[in-house]
Amino acid sequence: MTSFAQRLAALQKALRERQWQGYLVTQNVDLYYFTGSMQNGYLFVPAEGKAVFYVKRSVERAKQEAACDVRPLGSFREFSQSLKEKHPDAFRGVGIRFATEFDVLPTQLYLRLQQMFPHVEWVDGSRLVRELRMIKSPEEIERIRYAAEVTDRAFQRGLSVLREGMSELELVLEIERQLRIEGHAGIMRMRGYNQEIITGMVASGASAAIPTYFDGPAGGLGLHASVPQGASREVIERGEPILIDIGCCIDGYVIDQTRTAVIGQLAGKHLEQAYALSEQILQQTEHSLKPGTSCEGLYQDALATAEQANLGKHFMGYGADQVKFLGHGIGLEIDELPVLARGFAYPLQPGMVIAIEPKFSFPGEGVVGVEDTYAITSGGFERLTLTERKLFEV
Amino acid sequence: MTSFAQRLAALQKALRERQWQGYLVTQNVDLYYFTGSMQNGYLFVPAEGKAVFYVKRSVERAKQEAACDVRPLGSFREFSQSLKEKHPDAFRGVGIRFATEFDVLPTQLYLRLQQMFPHVEWVDGSRLVRELRMIKSPEEIERIRYAAEVTDRAFQRGLSVLREGMSELELVLEIERQLRIEGHAGIMRMRGYNQEIITGMVASGASAAIPTYFDGPAGGLGLHASVPQGASREVIERGEPILIDIGCCIDGYVIDQTRTAVIGQLAGKHLEQAYALSEQILQQTEHSLKPGTSCEGLYQDALATAEQANLGKHFMGYGADQVKFLGHGIGLEIDELPVLARGFAYPLQPGMVIAIEPKFSFPGEGVVGVEDTYAITSGGFERLTLTERKLFEV
């Protein structure tokens, strides 16, 4: 059985447990996860029987790539007809429920699905798919491991060119070029509405601590109000913390890593102490990284440590712009389950891959912190990111 | 009145005409268009009275950037309370209708809005906002003009390094570096569900003609089934058509331009003829580029010209993977109105900005074509893209 067939089988089992008759997969990343192809269309997965990928374009390419049956989508009317003919069991009886990804499905499409199938009750299957994707297979972890290797080389490249007076943009572009030539897709995909990220967040001093819309602990000035995050044209000065929070998307899989660098020495004992505390929180978290540990517990312990050091107000952003998490699942997207945050009662399980990123933000001065990505194993964890963990003084 | 205030006033006028009591703007690009800020939140625009931007994060930054009132969003319950208190007129009476962007709004949010406001009927305001954004102000056109200058320099950079045996990826990265250092955001934003594009589509020979999901006339092999478009690691060979379809997003605004290059001469008279026909179609289209011309007519005329030359089957993709348009509006996003396609009865109007891209695809051989971006003026058009129009033989 291929990994794609295994994934479809796991989805079908979950559908039967929930007494849902089918799942219509619509999002590009979910389509890739279940079929091996990211062509444009809809994958229908009945609770029983064979899944079919109805493709708008390219049918030819989907046939080459997909691990399941591919048929042309046709018009919406033809699609609705085909679904009923090909999957009669799913349409049998009363109380038919189909799931789809309410977290990303545009409202226009949702309303059209309701029109097409007046007897079907559509239910939110986002959580189900995100939970299936939360546990990675050994092949998936292997791909993330490779993205981590590339990221380490890109970080070293960045360090090798880092110098006083260069702009944040110049620095991130050196890193980005290395990532891209080794296969980075150019964006790190995100599921969240309105969220976007290219190669991470590289920023120095005050501009790193400028808050932004992005759901992360450091924002960045960015290039313009219309590109309001990450690297700016500000110049890197001696003594300021340089936050190098980078990642890439290679063969679909994303990695995330942060290191703090400085030209000379950090201008302020409090920045050094905060950096040291971020390493300490990461080590403390590692002690608990094993199956069974509660995700929200990890966040609460980290927050408590930050508060004991009187740095609670600076932890994971500053003041009103703090984010309330310590880490996030990562895989085909950068904002996967589990989240290390209150309300996420998941116990850690083998196969989860999580980026953990304790950071401290000081308005007007900068952001310090560290981030590694881990796979949870039966015995504890494997650190996937490879770069030495220290304050890089250059 | 600032341009943002003018845009809000135009939206309010349209709301009153439609007897809609308000518009809730939720998408990042639309938020930027109406407020000047892309922070995370919801902009409520009542038909009468003052618009308020309810911001999740960063409130501080939105206050600096936005041209309208900013308030903290708070919880959904607080948000719903604030809306009712701040905009009593919008909630007065029966039959209250609020619009929002059904084309991009995730279903989860739509359902939550319905729950929050059980007495409000939500209507699809996507088309309204897209139509307002269709007509660009002189400042917007100035920004697109600048993006065109940067793109010309990046194209020249690409040409200067182009050599036999380099990979498509190497070529696109040289172009991309130039775009990025001059301020390209790293992606060209798209509104369409599941659509993504970085710096365009640079591909050579057979791999350029490999179809893909992307809503454009040329696909590209890409790097992997999970990144299935644009440049690949295939090597550029002498005599094959090299399609350099590039653009960038600078200070929010996008441009799009295509040129065809070749090392030596095109391997085949039919490719030369098809390239010449693409230029001819673009010239023929330019003759009709003036206020009043029908958008769908431009597509039909171009298709007729392609068919007369017996190249209809190769026009805008090949066979089942053809796209059915000749060009697309462009501005903050790459897939704006109007579309030059059947079903788009819009007459051209001053202020529209349109990328027009006649291309011919030959499976196994490559794609040839040309694309320029134009602003429609009262007297006709201004070509915004600057690069000389010819087959670049290097």
Image (cartoon, coloured by chain):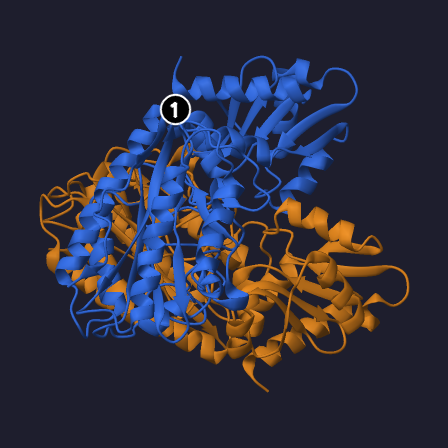
Chain colours: A blue, B orange
Q: Nearer the viewer, residue B227 or A134?
A: A134
Q: Is residue A17 left or right of residue A180?
A: right
Give residue B16's position: percent from left, percent from top: 77, 71
Q: Residues within 10 Å of mark 1 (few under 14, many from 20)?
A: few
Subunit that carries the residue with mark 1:
A
Asked whether residue B324 is in view, the answer is: no
Which residue lies under the disc numbered 1? A378
Tell me where residue B124 sits by quadrant: bottom right
Report the residue at 42% width, 21% height from top: A4
Asked whether residue A149 is in view, the answer is: yes
Q: Residue furthest front?
A: A308
Report the residue at 68% width, 33% height from top: A123
Tell me where residue A285 sits by quadrant: top left
For the C terminus of chain B, the quadrant is bottom left
B349 lies above or below B237? below
Give residue B147's position: percent from left, percent from top: 34, 69
A380 lies above or below B43? above
For the N terminus of chain B, the quadrant is bottom right
B12 lies above or below A8? below
Give residue B129's position: percent from left, percent from top: 62, 63
Report the residue at 34% width, 45% height from top: A283
Q: Nearer the viewer, residue A358 or A312?
A: A312
Give residue B391's position: percent from left, percent from top: 20, 56
Element type at mark 1: loop
Q: Nearer the viewer, residue A198 or A302?
A: A302
The three-letter code of the residue at mark 1 reads Ser
Counting labels gives 1
Q: Residue furthest right?
A: B93
Q: Nearer the viewer, residue B199 or A149?
A: A149
Tell me where residue B334 sits by quadrant: bottom left
